[in-house]
Image: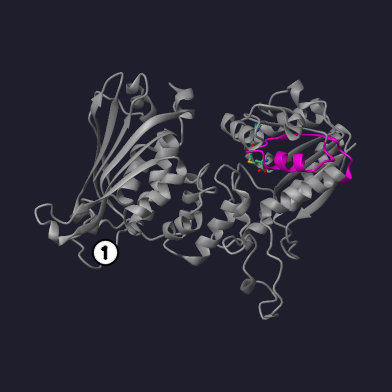
């Protein structure tokens, strides 16, 4: 199995820094089911290609008795796995290019964040649904796709085509995104996994899908195939995707997304009332509505969204005439760029909505910054749980002490509600980047302490269906002074 990644970046051999693999060396990595080799067939200033060759040992593949035991009851020794890209290649990629997939590169940090010209080739990709399927999955991600069927035997064209395609992707994409897309989509196209799909696969999918899967038009079928059609896992993953930052408005599609536990699991399972119910909005949407409502009720005319992500709340506030000026800040450059596009700030010319955007900038809540101040209200929607606990004190001082607006709205997951999410392992958190998730009592204790220290009153409001036992999925604290 072979995967080549080529770039024509100026200083193309910087690809070695991004992949954390030196272009002058051949490196070998032992895998549970074979050996992975990384080498560079070409590496100069204009063009650089890294090849990942996975040499699968069919005997080892059968004998591995790890948790990820491959189980091919048919053709255990004679199958296409050694030759065709599949979940084996995806696993090897995750192993060998682990740091690159996380987007980390200490020597060229700005390059790791930047889309670069890439050409990716897989000579033999098993592809259920044929070349059209590969196009469907990769094109919305900004790739130009060339997928051609591989004949069964070039000597005998009359035998027809095999189920493999030669896939070439060309595009300007951030390397980490490209690797994560391949990691998810190779097994999805193969529609077969070499290991049992356990519940931690949901976490892996959410992590690898960050920044692209939530907005993919085929996210539902990708998720279904990735999770081998295990219904509870698929439901959990789609729920979390709809909740993810970057999910488009149509992720509210009620058929696809079931944010709340399915009806058969709730107390009124027997109720088969024929009245069609209003489709339920996703939790992300309900949060936006709840925050907008309390801001409106508090009479806040100017609002800053701290940790604004891709700017969904800002877009909503701009639709509402009662907010004369809105601003956003996020520590992530990509998030700010995304928000800038969503609010169409990159377009020329005046516009009523654009003119109400007072500021949109990259900034960290852990450092006092005068730009956070001067607004009636500040919102931290699903942000505090992303802050390392030792840094949380700094954020409190910056928001409640230094910026100190009249109103602060904080939302965060209610950890008690997690037992209602099927497919979320006991004790697991909803998102891989969460540093903690609070119970209602923990949030209340934090909120009361912060309010008392800075002269605010705090009121707690549940968001989402308020479960009598474990509470609502989201908790919201409204601080006023
Ligand atoms: N408020 C948005 C995004 C929530 S995701 C929404 O509800 O949809 C959490 C966001 O917090 C991310 O965009 C992340 O980049 C941002 N964030 C995390 N730590 C931060 C910090 N120290 N300063 C500013 N933003 C931070």
Nearest the viewer among 61 and 48 is: 48
Q: Is residue 18 visible?
A: yes
Provide the residue span drawn in magenta: 297-323
As displayed, is residue 470 above or below residue 96? below
Left or right: residue 290 compared with residue 4: right
| Residue 1 x, y percent position in the rendering | 23, 46
Mark 1 sits on what residue? 72
Q: Residue at x 35, y 26 (%)?
A: 15
Nearest the viewer among 50 and 479 is: 50
The kind of secondary structure element at disc 1 is: loop
As displayed, is residue 238 above or below residue 296? below
| Residue 182 x, y percent position in the rendering | 38, 44
Q: Quadrant of residue 464?
A: bottom right
Q: Residue at x 36, y 32 (%)?
A: 118
As displayed, is residue 63 above or below residue 297? below
322 in the magenta segment: yes
Quadrant of the displayed image that contains ligand 1: top right
Q: Residue at x 76, y 29 (%)?
A: 355
109 in the magenta segment: no
Nearest the viewer among 413 and 156 is: 156
Tag count: 1
Left or right: residue 347 compared with residue 80: right
| Residue 191 x, y percent position in the rendering | 35, 59
């Amino acid at each position: 199995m072979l995967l080549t990644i080529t770039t024509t970046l100026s200083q193309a051999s910087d690809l070695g820094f991004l992949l954390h693999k030196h272009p002058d060396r051949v490196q070998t990595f032992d895998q549970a089911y074979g050996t992975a080799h990384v080498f560079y067939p070409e590496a100069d200033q204009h063009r650089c290609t890294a090849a990942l060759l996975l040499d699968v040992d069919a005997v080892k593949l059968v004998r591995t008795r790890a948790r990820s035991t491959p189980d091919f009851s048919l053709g255990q020794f004679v199958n296409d796995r050694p030759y065709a890209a599949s979940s084996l290649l995806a696993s090897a990629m995750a192993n060998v290019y682990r740091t690159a997939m996380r987007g980390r590169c200490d020597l060229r940090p700005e390059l790791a964040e930047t889309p670069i010209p890439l050409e990716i080739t897989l000579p033999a990709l098993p592809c259920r649904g044929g070349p059209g399927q590969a196009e469907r999955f990769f094109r919305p991600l900004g790739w130009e796709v060339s997928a051609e069927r591989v004949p069964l035997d070039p000597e005998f064209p009359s035998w027809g085509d095999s189920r493999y395609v030669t896939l070439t992707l060309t595009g300007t994409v951030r390397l980490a995104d490209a690797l994560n897309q391949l990691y998810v989509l190779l097994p999805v196209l193969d529609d077969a996994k070499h290991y049992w799909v356990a519940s931690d696969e949901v976490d892996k999918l959410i992590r690898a899908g960050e920044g692209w899967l939530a907005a993919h038009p085929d996210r539902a079928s990708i998720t279904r195939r990735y999770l081998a059609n295990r219904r509870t896992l698929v439901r959990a993953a789609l729920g979390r995707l709809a909740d993810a930052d970057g999910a488009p408005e149509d992720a509210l599609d009620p058929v696809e997304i079931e944010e709340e536990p399915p009806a058969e699991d709730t107390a009124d399972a027997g109720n088969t009332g024929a009245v069609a119910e209003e489709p339920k909005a996703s939790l992300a949407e309900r949060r936006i509505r709840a925050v907008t409502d309390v801001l409106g009720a508090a009479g806040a005319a100017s609002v800053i969204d701290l940790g604004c992500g891709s700017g969904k709340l800002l877009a909503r506030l701009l639709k509402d005439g009662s907010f004369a000026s809105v601003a956003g800040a996020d520590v992530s450059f990509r998030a700010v760029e995304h928000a800038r596009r969503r609010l169409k700030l990159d377009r020329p010319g005046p516009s009523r909505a654009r003119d109400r955007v007072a500021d949109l900038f990259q900034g960290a809540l852990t450092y006092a910054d005068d730009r956070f101040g001067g607004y009636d209200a500040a919102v931290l929607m699903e942000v505090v749980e992303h802050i390392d606990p030792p840094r949380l004190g700094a954020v409190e001082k910056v928001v409640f002490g230094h910026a100190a607006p009249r109103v602060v709205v904080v939302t965060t997951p209610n950890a008690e509600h997690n037992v209602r999410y099927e497919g979320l392992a006991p004790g697991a958190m909803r998102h891989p980047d969460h540093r903690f998730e609070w119970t209602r009592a923990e949030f209340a204790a934090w909120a009361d302490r912060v309010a008392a220290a800075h002269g605010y009153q705090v009121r707690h409001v549940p968001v989402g269906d308020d479960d009598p036992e474990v509470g609502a999925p989201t908790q919201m604290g409204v601080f006023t002074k």
